[in-house]
Image (tube, grey):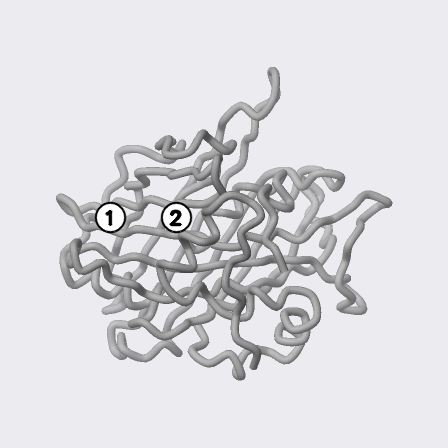
Amino acid sequence: MSHPVSLRGAGLAALLGLLSCVPAVPLAAEGQVTAPVTARGATGAFDEAAFRSFVEMRTGRGEPVYWYCEGLVYAYPSGKPLMRMEGIDTARLWRDPAEPGVAKQLSRKTFFYRDLATGRVLTEYGGQPLAPIEYPYQFITYELRDGRVRTFVEQGRAPRVQRIGPGEDMQVRRVRGDYVFTAPLFLDFPVSGAERYQAFENYDFVVSGRAEADPATHRLSWLRYGDIPGVGKTVMHLVSWRIDRYADLPAPMREYLETRARPWMQPPADIAEIRALQAPQGQSPPQPASR
């Protein structure tokens, strides 16, 4: 299976921020660095312990980790529930020997919609197509600098490989011994002509200070306000938790991946696979191993 050059569900491009803490913007030329539009002047500085906790929570220690997400999409301003939303963000940690203090995340993610009553996977809504959100890969870099976590994301395929960043607005707090990592995103950028993409997102990761090494304590609450093409203004709320074995994902999620999205069953294997996915269209990237 070849991976698409363009991002499916591009009208929801801000979902790139889910679990990566930086927003997406229109694809730039290869090698161009694009600064995200985020909150400025955030407080809540990181130390080495907080940075290490965040990285291990988010990426694991080298083996694949699976962030399973589920929640609801509401109409705004009525608050009427419209559909369920479900997805997977799978990642692994990679360290570049040339940059021992920098954490590299190899990941891919997909999100889709289900009918509220039946759980059926939705491919249209109100007579309009409703595409899943699919990222064949994301290559994310985290670096601690002067109490801030600097985040860069690479995505896309040549000749339109894009590097997004730096994002520097994630905050950390201690609440009764737990780490709470918060990333608010205020998105506002042009998309075509006078049209602008505007949305708000907020991410709260919680890691228990009483058992930081236990992935069962890793949680995320995510909220988004913005448009879904063909649906209108919505509020999305997802909760997510980390699972360290593919077999422990909920059965409906595994069924979706195995029948509709097999490349998303595991993260990229290594940096060589990332570079293959960034190569011009027509080159076949490595395929995930069958399970």
Q: Residue at x 65, y 73 (%)?
A: 258
Is 127 left, or right, of 262 in this rendering? right
| Residue type at numbered disc 2 | Cys
From the top left corner, tell me how far across and down residue 13 is, in percent: 55, 41
Farthest-out residue, front: 283
User: Would you place residue 107 above or below residue 225 in this image?
Assistant: below
Quarter of the view holding residue 251 = bottom right
**Residue assigned mark 2:** 21
| Residue type at numbered disc 1 | Val
Mark 2 burial class by Cα count in 10 Å: few <14, some 14-19, many 20+: many
Farthest-out residue, right: 127
Quarter of the view holding residue 110 = bottom right
The CA span between labels 1 and 2 is: 10 Å
Is 63 left, or right, of 226 in this rendering? left
Closest to the observer: 79 or 7?
A: 7
From the top left corner, tell me how far across and down residue 184 is, in percent: 40, 43
From the top left corner, tell me how far across and down residue 102 is, in percent: 21, 54
Closest to the observer: 220 or 242?
A: 242
Identify the mark at residue 77; answer none if there is no mark.
none
From the top left corner, tell me how far across and down residue 103 is, in percent: 25, 58
Q: Secondary structure at mark 1?
A: strand
Q: Residue at x 61, y 51 (%)?
A: 133
N-terminal of the pair, mark 1 or mark 2, is 2
Q: Residue at x 60, y 61 (%)?
A: 71
Answer whether labels 1 and 2 touch (C-beta < 8 Å). yes
**Residue assigned mark 1:** 149
